Image (cartoon, rainbow, N blue to C red):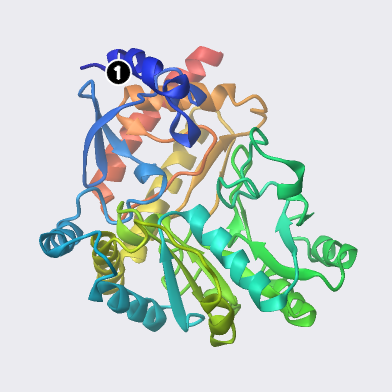
Amino acid sequence: MTDADLRRRALKVVPGGMYGHLNAALFAPGFPQFFERGEGCRQWDVDGREYIDFMCSWGPVVLGHRHPGVEAAAARQAALGDCLNGPGPIMVELAELLVDTVPSADWAMFSKNGTDATTQALMVARAATGRTKVLMAHGAYHGADPWCTPSLSGTTPNERADLVEFAYNSLESLEAAAATVEGDVAAIIVTPFKHDSFEDQELVEPAFARGARALADRLGAALVIDDVRAGFRVDLRGSWEPYGVRPDLTAWSKAMANGYPIAAVTGTDALRGPAQTLYSTGSFWFSAVAMAAAKATIEILRDTDGIGAMERAGTQLREGLYEQAKSHGFVVNQTGPVTIPWLSFDGDADLSTAMYWSDACLRHGVYLHPWHNWFMSAAHTEADVARALEGTDQAFAETRAHFA
């Protein structure tokens, strides 16, 4: 069955044939919609084409597809049971591991995806403070529930009424936003760096991170770090730990279980009581297999310096792309942490150059994205990156010829 066949069939039984952020209609023309399998840092689409994968399933795959240690842990738990009448012992073990790993974590609650976690974190903040307003950076992505989805279709204005926006990395803007709802701020929610789609990424200014912590303390509000995208790729302890800034609540998901569906909220002792008051649950939230996969993933990242491996591969990729772009006469911007990279072309306002280049990369066996950040995995070896750079170099040459 080909990709084209599956698209035709899907159109009859799925709205639009596909929906959400995995909809290939949003990307360059050559992007496949359906995939057959993954192994290490590679994926194969249903037409049999092989790619070195720099999207890692949009972030969840952090150790490489089908990592044997994670798969073995998941299989052992599956042999015992997965969706039971209550959680397995693995829930306690995973919570203990998170508390041991993350300095700001005194407890953990689990769910299934990043939207669950960010929503749950704000519920805890509101339960703790009795307040309603949330300060959020303009353009930031925190999930797909009505309060935060980028699309307004199917939502009501009331679902956004308690959000007050500020400009990322501007402490002045954050202070001004707080002043407009003085006395009613439940939380400041912020990503560890600015990773809005279609825009160059922006690392956090340490003064902004420290200022956000100080403002939350002054307001008596919760500082919530949305570490769904960056968690376990920047620092195992939490992405703002290197700045000496610890949140009250952290939302985790994506890379937590190497592709198995799970999310978590971790928090401080001061918020343990309010967290207990929530009714926040789901029939599949306590699936033991995903928890076993998460425990294995975090332990492997810790014991093998997985983040260090990603940093080395990401640095090799960034340096290689810079030299290639320069040699082909392109000015490019490479932004974000090297473990969560992105490349944009200077002056490419309509993304036509990025779309053409990413499509050309596909033709040469490299899967990356024209307007969303990429993801490294610990499975990307020096040889894999070198092979990928052969493909990107050819793509740069074809792009230069096309736009000459």
In this rendered view, identify the residue nearer to me: 1 or 355.
Answer: 1
Residue 371 left/right relative to 63: right
Residue 183, x across and y down, in percent:
85, 73
User: Can you see residue 337?
Assistant: no
Where residue 286 sits: x, y (%)? 33, 64
348 horizontally vs 363: left or right: right
Picture quadrant of residue 281? bottom left
- Residue lying at the far bottom in this picture: please name it: 269
The residue that label 1 is drawn on is: 6
Say whether residue 356 is left or right of residue 223. Answer: left
* Residue 24 seen in render: yes
Q: Residue at x 41, y 43 (%)?
A: 320
Report the front residue among 225 and 14: 14
Q: Is residue 246 above or below residue 284?
A: below
Determine crowd level at label 1: few under 14, some 14-19, many 20+ residues with C-alpha closer than 10 A. some
Mark 1 belongs to which amino acid?
A: Leu
**Position of residue 143 measured from the top left corner of the image (x, y, whole percent):** 55, 49
